[in-house]
Amino acid sequence: MSALLKKEMRLSALLLTYLFIVFGAMTLLPGYPILCGAFFICLGIFQSFQSAREANDIVYSALLPVAKRDVVKGKFQFATFIELCGFLLMAVLTVVRMTVLADALVYRHNALMNANPFYLGMALLIFGLFNVILVGGFFKTGYKLGKPFVIFSIVAFVVIGIAEALHYFPGLQVLNAFGLDHLGLQLALLAGGILAYILLTVLAYRKACADFEKIDL
């Protein structure tokens, strides 16, 4: 673990951010758009960014004997750490729903998205978009968070709405597979989500480094 990540976790992060990881447990909620759990995990990260900004954390970090790109790296490492903790919780509970609870009537009669690998892939897409729009957007100025968060919120709920609607289109019912049905396709969709998350995060990090270098703090 890098020194700057430790600094983010111990000094910059709010307890609230860690508590919001528990929203990954929304995976178990029937009759609810469970992808909202990914949004709330991102909301927790946003709260830490907002608190750090008010404490002039970015200026403090820039004054440390590290390169400016390392300051960016610390923030991205913190965001991805929280996201992956939330994703791990969501993945474990998804496996529970796909196995132990596969035939539970409360889920079989659920009109909304089922917990399966496609759901996990979409959660990773939301996390990747957060890294691009909010984390990357923050480093365009080093202090503006309101506009990036509003944009992310709109984009995230559009993605959630599309993901919830897709399995109602003819031929796409397999996206809402129960248990181990269509597992090969489901795992392929999860792999797509993993790839999207990695690409979005790497591209956001590189652009954020370039943007932050231009800022005169």
Image: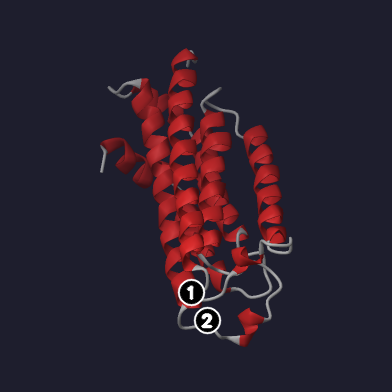
Dot 1: few (<14), some (14–19), or many (≥20) neighbours within 10 Å?
some
Q: Percent from the top left, x then y, of residue 18?
A: 45, 56
* Left or right of 28 in this view: 155: right
Q: Residue at x 59, y 53 (%)?
A: 39
Residue assigned mark 2: 102
For the residues bearing labels 2 and 1, Cβ distance under 8 angstroms:
yes
Q: Amino acid at mark 1?
A: Leu
User: To which residue does mark 1 refer?
Assistant: 180
Q: Nearer the viewer, residue 128 or 43?
A: 128
Q: Position of residue 25 (x, y in %)?
A: 52, 68
Residues under labels 2 and 1: Cα distance? Answer: 8 Å
Please say if 54 is above or below 103.
Answer: above
Extreme front residue here? 171
Identified by mark 2, the residue type is: Ala
Mark 2 nearby-residue class (10 Å; few <14, some 14–19, many ≥20): some
For the point 26% across and 37% down, which residue is it?
3
Q: Secondary structure at mark 1?
A: loop
Q: Quadrant of the N terminus?
A: top left
**Which of 128 and 66 lies nearest the eye of the viewer?**
128
Towards the viewer: 100 or 40: 100
- Where in the figure is residue 88, as x and y percent of width and height? 41, 61
- The residue shown at (31%, 24%) is 64
